[in-house]
Amino acid sequence: MTEQAVHWFGLGAAEWQAVALSLKVAFWAALLSLPLGIFVAYALARWRFAGREVLNGLVHLPLILPPVVTGYLLLMTFGARAPIGAALQEIGIVFAFRWSGAALAAAIMGFPLMVRAIRLSIEAIDPKLEEAATSLGASPIRVFWTITLPLALPGVLAGVVLAFAKALGEFGATITFVSNIPGQTRTLPSAIYAFLQVPGGESAALRLVVISIVLAMTALILSEFLARRMAKRGRGA
């Protein structure tokens, strides 16, 4: 079946391919960064240690740096000729110019939003609840799993969805690190950029812009809805 023959909701095969790849990249970016995001958020919210401010700065650095710089640093670190990239390639792990690299770039760009949402949620928990559980003999790990994490779930959920939404719209770091290869690394933003570079591509770009807005708004509304439900359930409502 030719690309011109495939038109669902007005989108051609190349456009649907970009949508599907963006969802795949955003899903894995949010999912794989979640464990580290929870750990870092908890460390920043509850621990006092040397270098804490440095860690906080490094976490939020992707929000300050131009995305192209982040992409360049990823290329210099995980590229085929970079020491780390070459070592990973020996065991079959390749990031540069692959969809997995797009997921890595998107995860890094969305990580600060995830950490901030989870951290604020943890800081809003009354420390006396954790202290009471500790005084009753619960270990720190058990306190975390039974007290802290359940109470912080609204923030965790919000962080995941924000990271997901950010990953859907990531462009600068992604295109620098993995380029714009159709079917491999061409996500929604890079597809929009590509369509705008060719004559007659404006209509396809506009359709993808609409899809991007709908996906982002859906993610944000869903995040707010679920966070409110979890918060009410946490209060026993």
Image (tube, rainbow, N blue to C red):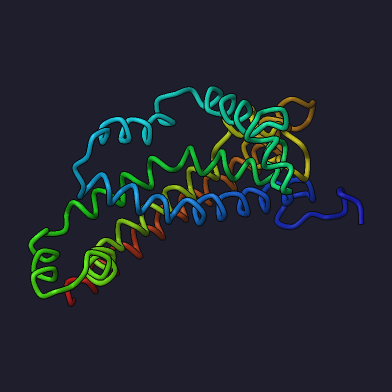
Based on the displayed image, in which of its 4 quarters is residue 55 positioned? top left
Residue at far right of view = 1
Which quadrant does the C terminus fall into? Answer: bottom left
Q: Position of residue 121 (x, y in %)?
A: 24, 54
Q: Position of residue 104 (x, y in %)?
A: 57, 42
Residue placed at 75% from the left, 44% from the top? 184
Residue placed at 86% from the left, 49% from the top? 3
Horizontal arrangement in the rendering, residue 128 relative to residue 178 (left or right)? left
226 shown above or below 172: below
Q: Position of residue 166 (x, y in %)?
A: 48, 43
Which one is in front, 171 or 118? 118
Which one is in front, 197 or 53? 53
Residue placed at 35% from the left, 65% from the top? 226
Circle count: 0
Q: Position of residue 123 (x, y in %)?
A: 18, 51
Horizontal arrangement in the rendering, residue 91 relative to residue 218 (left or right)? right
